[in-house]
Amino acid sequence: MATEQGTLLLAEDLVAACLARYKRHGTVIATAKGAALEHLAFRHPFYDRNSPVYLGDFVTLEQGTGIVHSSPAYGIDDFNVCRRYGMRDDDMLNPVQGDGRYAADLPLFGGLKIWDANPKIVEKLREVHALLHAEKYVHSYMHCWRHRTPIIYRATTQWFAGMEEVPGFRGTRPPVSLRSTALAGIEATQFFPAWGKSRLYNMIAHRPDWTLSRQRQWGVPLPFFVDKVTDELHPDTPRCSSSPPARCRKAASRHGSPPRTRISASIPPATASLTDTLDVWFDSGSTHQTVMGGPEGRVTGAGSRPQDTGFPADLYLEGSDQHRGWFHSSLLVSCMRNGVPPYKALLTHGFVVDGDGRKMSKSKGNVVAPQKIADSLGAEILRLWVASTDFSGDMAIGDEILKRVVESYRRIRNTLRFLIANTADFDAARDAVPIAEMLEIDRFAMAQARALVAAVTHDYANYDFHLVVQRLQTYCSETLGGLLPRRAEGSALHVGARRTRTPLGADGAGADSRRAAGADGAGAVVHCRGSVADRPSGGSDDLRSHVGQDARPRSRFRSSGGEVGPDSRRARRRAEGARGCAPGRRHRLVAAGGSDDHCAAERLRATGGARRRSALRADHVGGARGAGCGAGRDR
């Protein structure tokens, strides 16, 4: 394009826009493909040097001239293009220093801040008659996410963990790439939930090399020593890295000088220690070495707790955001150091949100404090909420949700109390009945209990704690809530195990039926104990105190008058006062799933003049108000 100010080189689609912006007139004198300009040299406007032409696919026709200025030291696209054309690091001009100023030896603008130098550069272009047009416009620019201030890219020497090709140390290269080792480790790892595997796998498969070095004023320094001229590692870097700390501590204690100064004084003059620090994710990712000591930790004693842990760990668990964080860095560090992952399984969980699914924030006022829940509802309710919530996604908590948890807790606890009360005098060694001699309904009850244990064991192995709670709720409310009261109708299984039409241990079919029913109740107690044993709560403590290691129930209900049992004086008084109570109705006092009003009505209708004594019995068995127990406390 020929103009009154000289010949211009413009993209064909941008000719009209450029001439209008420059307020110039011109004529097209020749056209050519952009590839024809490759490797041509342009003269710098005011420095005595040439600039070659490289082809880049990131140049667009939305604005400009179709030709852009490249600064390989300050832009990712520019850097990649120049490296593709073989430009070496030493050939890349890097006049901007870490403090945002131009290097002092840069002609014309040395020592100036880049923001202060911008208008001076424009004036210099105008001075040498190389400026066609200048204008200011607003565009997006990189800013620090923390300080909200503008930042610039700078090409600096960094240290990397290569995912594919690496130069090796002293000519020795690893036989398998870090990426291949990490991907193989992921295949050998269990994931809970299963979708975590594909997420971590894709991150490792497509990630670039890991930049280990950082330019920070704080952090763990890289213990490397390099040649001041060539930047090559000191040939005895491992020894230099391991020996200075002891000398450093002694020197610091004697002279009070910074450790880095003393370390530098102990190495050859032509060698310098790095001032870079490690990426903080490398710090957290190396805890398997500092805690477990690696594969040889128990033998060598390395690590802080090698005997208590062991390598690899059975489980790493963290939030779902740690696939790109701790899980990620731990995997890479261990694969570099040990060739295997530091864990056998990974578990990820969501985050707690309010009842409407919103992120908790103090400014929104929707934070639910755990201590407040524990103070108002009890720690067991908080524990049960944790256990009953599917942690694979975000976990909602609120007043309505906690009310439902309270209902579930009461249903489970009241069922357990019913079982314990009705098996208080059951002796497995004396009263147990072989399964073959049980009634069909008793065998069905035992089969249901064993099926519960099998399902719960599988859920625990897969960390599906919410399924454990669901199964236990269903078992208590439907299986036991519907089966045991009906079984008690025929065998007189009720509060006070010896108050039966046919006493336990007597001859006849009634005794066998009673013993079989007792075996049902005892078996249900044992299986429920196994289902809640891993839930840290008072409910599981109740069962542990009631069921011994030999799985034989023992009575735990006591009062100021002594133990409540079939031979106690208080129990005999209650039995005498309850003689008018219909045997088929008496179990409803503490039947699982019943209501306070229903129990009270049944008691008043069945016991007549013995109302007060029956109420005392229900109070000792229930211990607290709830569905089916404690009804007598308020009467």
Image: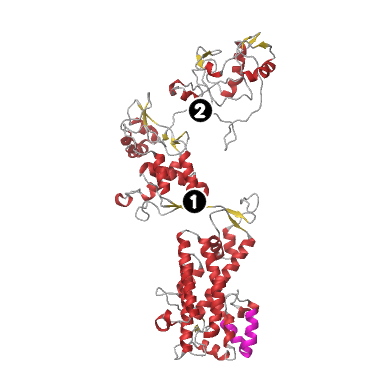
Region in magenta: 598-617
Which residue, given by chain and number where applicable, does mark 2 sit on?
154
Q: Main secondary structure of the magenta part?
A: helix
Q: Nearer the viewer, mark 1 or mark 2?
A: 1
Q: Is residue 573 visible?
A: yes
**Whole-percent x and y of residue 429?**
39, 81
Residue at the image point whose x is 43% and y is 47% from the top:
186
Q: Earlier in the sequence, mark 1 or mark 2?
A: 2
Q: How many marks?
A: 2
Pointer 1 with pointer 2, Cβ within 8 A: no
Which corner quadrant of the image does residue 584 belong to? Answer: bottom right
| Residue lying at the far left of the rendered structure | 299
Instruction: Out of 532 and 584, give the one closest to the viewer.
Output: 584
- Between the C-alphas of marks 1 and 2, the distance is 34 Å
For residue 600, above or below residue 343: below
Q: Is residue 159 left or right of residue 469?
A: left
Amino acid type of disc 2? Answer: Arg
Which corner quadrant of the image does residue 409 belong to? Answer: bottom right
**Whole-percent x and y of residue 201?**
46, 44
Residue 196 falls within the magenta-colored stretch: no
Which residue, given by chain and number where applicable, does mark 1 sit on?
318
